[in-house]
Image (cartoon, rainbow, N blue to C red):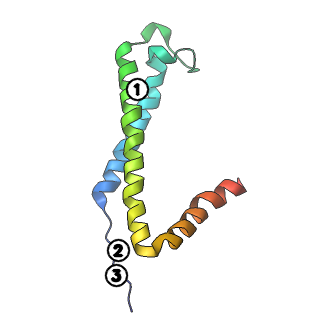
């Protein structure tokens, strides 16, 4: 019997790409955030801004939450397709094995 055709969910790929792009702006903004001047190696004290602080904190909280939401969304599909045991094997292969090797 043939496996059903998998449909790619393009809008979720777009959401993930936008979250990654927001991460680029987040890390660039750290250099200009006033609260991170002592922690960031390339900080610019003269150009620091509280507005940038607000952007950095908000985008970080929003972005990380969004990544967890997307991960849960796709984990549901993997569990539905392979079952809990298949899901755990998949996670062990994709996450635990590289972690142990490197």
Name, please, the residue furthest toward the front: 84
Task: Say which quarter of the image contains residue 21.
Answer: top left
Q: Name the residue under label 3.
A: 4
Residue 57: give its label: 1
Residue 89 vertical position relative to residue 16 in the rendered view, above or below: below
Q: Who's the residue at 71% across and 57% down the image?
A: 101
Q: Is mark 1 on a helix, strand or loop?
A: helix
Locate residue 8 relative to residue 24 in the image: left or right.
left
Pointers 3 and 2 in contact (CB under 8 A)? yes
Q: Where is residue 94 in the image (x, y as percent from the top left)?
A: 57, 62
Residue at 28%, 55% in the rendered image: 11
Question: Which residue is outermost to the bottom?
Answer: 1
- Quadrant occupied by the N terminus: bottom left
Residue extending furthest toward the top: 46
For residue 81, what is the image quadrant? bottom left
Nearest to the observer: residue 66 or residue 83: 83
Q: Earlier in the sequence, mark 1 or mark 2?
A: 2
Q: Estimate the spatial distance between the alpha carbons at disc 3 and disc 1, rounded to whole Å.
A: 43 Å
Q: How far apart in space, not on screen, are marks 3 and 2 (Cα)?
A: 6 Å
Residue 10: percent from the left, percent from the top?
Answer: 30, 59
Q: Which mark is residue 6?
A: 2
Q: How far apart are marks 1 and 2 (CA)?
A: 37 Å
Check the image and report above or below for 64 versus 54. Answer: below
Where residue 42 sits in the image (x, y, percent)? 55, 19
Q: Label 2 neighbourhood size at 10 Å, few (<14), some (14-19), many (20+)?
A: few
């Amino acid at each position: 019997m043939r496996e059903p055709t998998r449909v790619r969910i393009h809008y979720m790929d777009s959401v993930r790409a936008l979250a990654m792009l927001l991460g680029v702006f987040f890390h660039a903004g750290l250099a200009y955030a006033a609260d991170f001047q002592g922690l960031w190696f390339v900080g610019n004290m003269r150009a620091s801004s509280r507005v940038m602080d607000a952007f950095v904190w908000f985008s970080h909280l929003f972005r990380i939450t969004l990544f967890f939401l997307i991960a849960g969304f796709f984990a549901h599909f993997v569990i539905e397709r392979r079952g809990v045991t298949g899901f755990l094997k998949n996670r062990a292969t994709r996450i635990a094995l590289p972690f142990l090797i490197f």
